[in-house]
Image (spheres, rainbow, N blue to C red):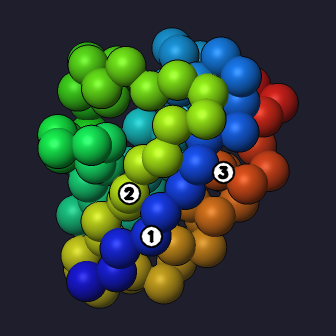
C-alpha cells in the first residue's frame, strides 16, 4: 500500500472536467485507489464520490493505492496532480 499527499494547484479545485479526467485515469489500473480529504475517504471510481469531497484549490488530499500496479499508479497520479491538473 502506498499513500501520497498532494496539494491541489488548480485554483478552481477538482471540478467536473478534472474530476472526469482523474476518474478515467484511475480506471486504467487494477489497484484499488482511494482519495482522502480531511476525515472523509472515497473510492476513486465515481464522479459523484469525488465531487462530494468539495475539493478546492489549495486543499490537501491523500491518495491511497493498494494493488499490483501501485508504482504505475503513483507515476500517473504524480503527472496528473503536478502537471495536468493546473491546465484543466
- The answer to whether marks 2 and 1 mark residues whose Cβ atoms lie closer than 8 Å is yes
Whole-number angstrom distance, CA of label 2 to CA of label 1: 5 Å
Which is in the foreground here, disc 3 or disc 2? 2
Q: Is residue 65 left or right of residue 4?
A: left
Relative to 77, does residue 70 appear above or below in the rendering? Answer: below
State the SS at label 1. Answer: strand
State the SS at label 2. Answer: strand
Whole-number angstrom distance, CA of label 3 to CA of label 2: 14 Å
Between 88 and 57, the residue placed more toward the observer is 57
Picture coordinates of residue 78, whole percent (x, y)? 64, 64
Which is in the foreground here, disc 1 or disc 3? 1
Residue drawn at 71 percent across, 39 percent down: 9
Residue drawn at 17 percent across, 44 percent down: 39
For the question of whether residue 44 can be seen, the reply is no
Residue under numbered circle 3? 80
Find residue 1 and report its image quarter. bottom left
Residue under numbered circle 1? 4
Find residue 34 and report its image quarter. bottom left
Picture coordinates of residue 55, whole percent (x, y)? 44, 27
**Disc number placed over residue 62 in the picture, else none:** 2
Picture coordinates of residue 44, whole percent (x, y)? 29, 44
Mark 1 packing: few (<14 Cα in 10 Å), some, or many (20+)? few
Picture coordinates of residue 49, whole percent (x, y)? 23, 27
Q: Is residue 87 left or right of residue 32?
A: right
Q: Earlier in the sequence, mark 3 or mark 2?
A: 2
Amino acid at each position: 500500500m502506498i499513500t501520497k499527499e498532494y496539494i491541489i494547484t488548480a485554483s478552481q479545485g477538482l471540478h467536473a472536467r478534472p474530476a472526469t479526467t482523474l476518474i478515467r485515469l484511475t480506471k486504467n489500473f487494477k489497484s484499488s485507489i482511494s482519495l482522502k480529504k480531511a476525515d472523509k475517504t472515497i473510492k476513486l471510481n465515481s464522479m459523484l464520490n469525488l465531487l462530494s469531497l468539495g475539493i478546492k484549490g489549495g486543499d490537501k488530499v491523500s491518495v491511497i493505492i493498494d494493488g499490483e500496479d501501485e508504482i504505475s499508479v503513483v507515476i500517473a497520479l504524480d503527472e496528473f496532480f503536478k502537471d495536468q491538473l493546473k491546465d484543466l
